[in-house]
Image (tube, helix red, strand yellow):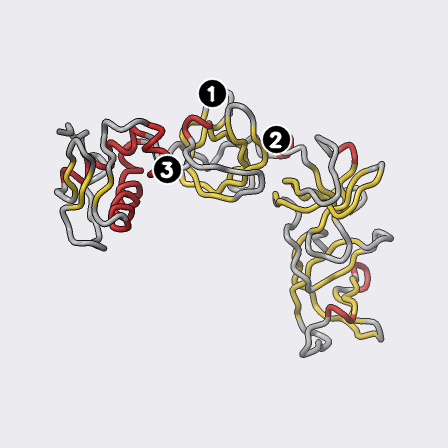
Amino acid sequence: MLEIGSYNDLVVQREVSFGFYLNPKEEEVLLPLKYVPADGLKVGQVIRVFVYTDSEDRPIATTLIPNAVVGDFAFLEVKDTAHFGAFLDWGLEKELFIPKNEMTKHLKKGEKCVVKVCLDKETGRVYATTNIEENCSKYMVGLSEGMAVNLLIYGITKLGYKAIIDNAHYGVLYKNETFEPLFIGDRTNGYIHRIREDGKIDLRLKKVGYSSVPESALKIVDLLNKEGGFIPCNDKSSPDIIMQKFGMSKKEFKRSIGNLYKERKIEITDKGISLLMSPQVSVVLAPETAPDVVLP
């Protein structure tokens, strides 16, 4: 069966003046001539195409690559609007329609929004929705705390950043635990911090505790190298100064320099931190389970 809104591997059945028909006649689909590969096609050949519907709701194939397929979440631009909905650029000649009743806010031409690409199984039409949470999976199978995930930011509140997890679930990155600016449409890596009893998911950009220290310690060493081996900042510095200079919380900074100090990679004084190594040196850090170091 044809999968509308998805990629299909179809057999070339016959050639016509305006293209090629793919698939047996009862489910044939036209691949217009402008989408035929430069090296041509032959009857019996298998070709991978994306199938959607034309303006008359007939299945049509293309070799163009859309920005998203049915089931995907994507950050798309509004190309035009009407009183009954809006039209989004998803990389194909026919724009992706988002009905008015699938819009959580009024959309304007030129703005971008995060949507899910859906299929109306009754009509075979592909459409978009900004009702993100309603269209995420409610099943937590395969998810676990500490798991590395891919995130797509779809909303910002006073508390934090709403993110789609692995193109399936949604969770929140709290602002007081996120130490870098994020914007709607950003894609980033993160970790599942906690799965609540009500199914809500708390996220972090870094692993909790010592598991995040190596990356942060390497960042500190890199900055020290760039600054000539000394930075006037230590564990007594204010959280704002540490955030501005290193882009991390004071707690993580203290753990990182503590680890580096234990490995005799840096010196910590009341004036700041200094490299005890030659510039551009690599760092091998203590195991993640290492205890906190009492700083001088």
Percent x, y for residue 282? 22, 53
Foreground label between 1 and 3: 3
Foreground label between 2 and 3: 3
* Label 2–label 3 contact, CB within 8 A: no
Q: Secondary structure at mark 1?
A: loop
Percent x, y for residue 209? 29, 31
- Residue at horizontal 75 percent and vertical 66 percent from the top: 22
Percent x, y for residue 175? 46, 28
Q: Secondary structure at mark 2?
A: helix
Which quarter of the rendered picture does the N terminus lie within? bottom right
Task: Estimate how packed mark 3 is, as few (under 14), some (14 to 19) or many (20 or more) residues with alpha carbons within 10 Å.
Answer: some
Residue 40, above or below 274: below
Q: Which residue is mark 3?
A: 247
Q: Is residue 133 left or right of residue 34?
A: left
The kind of residue tagged 2 is: Glu
Q: Which residue is mark 2?
A: 133
The kind of residue tagged 1 is: Glu
- Residue at horizontal 40 percent and vertical 30 percent from the top: 193
Q: Is residue 185 left or right of residue 195?
A: right
Q: Kindly report the distance in space between the C-alpha atoms of the residues bearing marks 2 and 3.
A: 30 Å
What label sits on residue 197 in the rendered view? 1
Instruction: Give the quarter of the image for residue 164.
Output: top right
Task: Estimate how packed mark 1 is, as few (under 14), some (14 to 19) or many (20 or more) residues with alpha carbons within 10 Å.
Answer: few
Q: Secondary structure at mark 3?
A: loop
Q: Kindly report the distance in space between the C-alpha atoms of the residues bearing marks 2 and 1.
A: 17 Å
Which quarter of the rendered picture does the C terminus lie within? top left
The kind of residue tagged 3 is: Gly
Q: How many marks?
A: 3
Foreground label between 2 and 1: 2
Name the foreground residue: 168 vs 253. 253
Q: Does residue 1 show up?
A: no
